[in-house]
Amino acid sequence: MGNPVQDSILLTDNITMQFGGLRAVSDLNLSIQPKQIVGLIGPNGAGKTTAFNMITGVYKPTSGQVHFNGSDITGLKPNQITDRGIARTFQNIRLFSSMTVLENVMLSKHVRLKANPIEAILGLPRYTRARKRQFQECMDLLEQVQLADLAQEKATALSYGKQRRLEIARALATQPAMILLDEPAAGMNPQESLELMEFIAKIRDQFGLTVLMIEHHMEVVMGICEQIVVLDHGETIARGTPVEIQNNQQVIEAYLGAVEEIA
Ligand SMILES: Nc1ncnc2c1ncn2[C@@H]1O[C@H](COP(=O)(O)OP(=O)(O)OP(=O)(O)O)[C@@H](O)[C@H]1O
């Protein structure tokens, strides 16, 4: 038998997040293999974003550990976790609206450019060379996500679907091994959702990425996720393939319960 810490690119070992009297996530165990696309689903308030926040260092788990690429990353700061190779996008699009498409990606790439500030201020050759290389890498990235022809457009001039794609491109600019997508299809029409699915599958293959995604659009989750983990009130109620999850009685009841709570 293999060692689960070494075989998985991401492994969460009983991570729990307690906010005062509320256990937002309880003993979550994830074991994700390299290049897998995994869905994290569940009704509103189930604890999905809190799980992302624990993995990406926004919150330190109340208990439990997060292992990435074989090392314990629990309690590291978000920028340290980005440096280790985990990138994320957010539920609400977070682009710099006054900047161009290229500038948005360049800014994200800058995180990776470990320039000496003195070299940067004086515009020394080493810094200028690094900036040129950075520009070329960002243009190549925009080419790969089919946004290169829009590089000089304002980010806000893009259609909603393309803004989502730009957000993912910004995350890719940090050269991650794994990407966490928080509701990438939110607000999309069926055609845009379909294009997004194809796009996620494509970047997984192209960049050798591992993907963990929160998504409410079931056609997207069932269409591209190889494994699905279901949370409800912070508890893991099911895990399995799309077919297994679709037929899981507890999952069906959790979603029906959520509809009844709203009604
Ligand atoms: N910083 C916080 N302080 C206190 N409670 C919080 C905090 N963050 C989240 N919660 C609570 O934890 C629970 C889980 O929230 P979370 O946002 O993780 O759910 P979710 O599954 O992502 O929901 P949604 O699908 O609506 O985005 C909710 O009851 C929420 O109100």
Image (cartoon, rainbow, N blue to C red):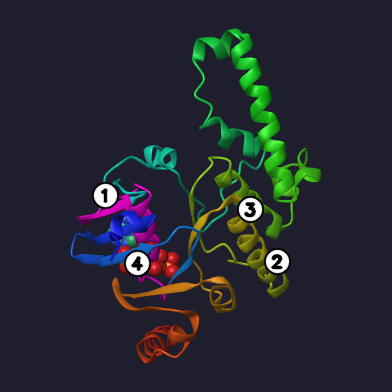
Q: In the rendered structure, does residue 13 fall within the stretch colored magenta?
A: no
| Earlier sequence position, callout 4 versus callout 2 | 4
Mark 3, residue position: 206
- Asked if the residue under mark 2 is in contact with the one under mark 3, i.e. CB atoms within 8 Å, the reply is no
Q: Which residue lies at the image location 44% right of the left edge and 91% below the top edge?
A: 247
Nearer the observer: mark 4 or 3; the answer is: 3
Ligand 1 located in image quadrant: bottom left
Quadrant of the image occupied by residue 32: bottom left
Q: Going by the image, does 162 lie left or right of 233?
A: right
- For the point 59% across and 34% down, the residue is 107
Secondary element at tag 3? helix
Residue 147 in picture, x, y percent from top left: 75, 48
The residues bearing labels 4 and 2 have C-alpha atoms spaced at a distance of 27 Å
Q: Residues within 10 Å of mark 4 (few under 14, many from 20)?
A: many
Residue type marked 4: Gly
x then y, percent, for residue 86: 44, 47
Q: Which residue is mark 2?
A: 195
Q: Is residue 81 above or below residue 201?
A: above
Q: Nearer the viewer, mark 1 or mark 2?
A: 2
Helix, strand, or loop for circle 4?
loop
Residues drawn in magenta: 41-67
Upstream in the sequence, badge 1 or badge 2? 1
Dot 2: what SS? helix
> Left or right: 14 with respect to 170?
left
Precedes in sequence: disc 4 or disc 3: 4
The answer to whether the residue bearing label 4 lies less than 8 angstroms from the nearest atom of ligand 1 is yes
Q: Residue 163 appears at what percent x and percent y?
A: 67, 53
Name the side, left or right, on which 117 lies relative to 205. left
Label 1 and label 4: CA atoms lie apart by 15 Å
Mark 1 sits on what residue? Answer: 60
Q: Quadrant of residue 21?
A: bottom left
Q: Earlier in the sequence, mark 3 or mark 2?
A: 2
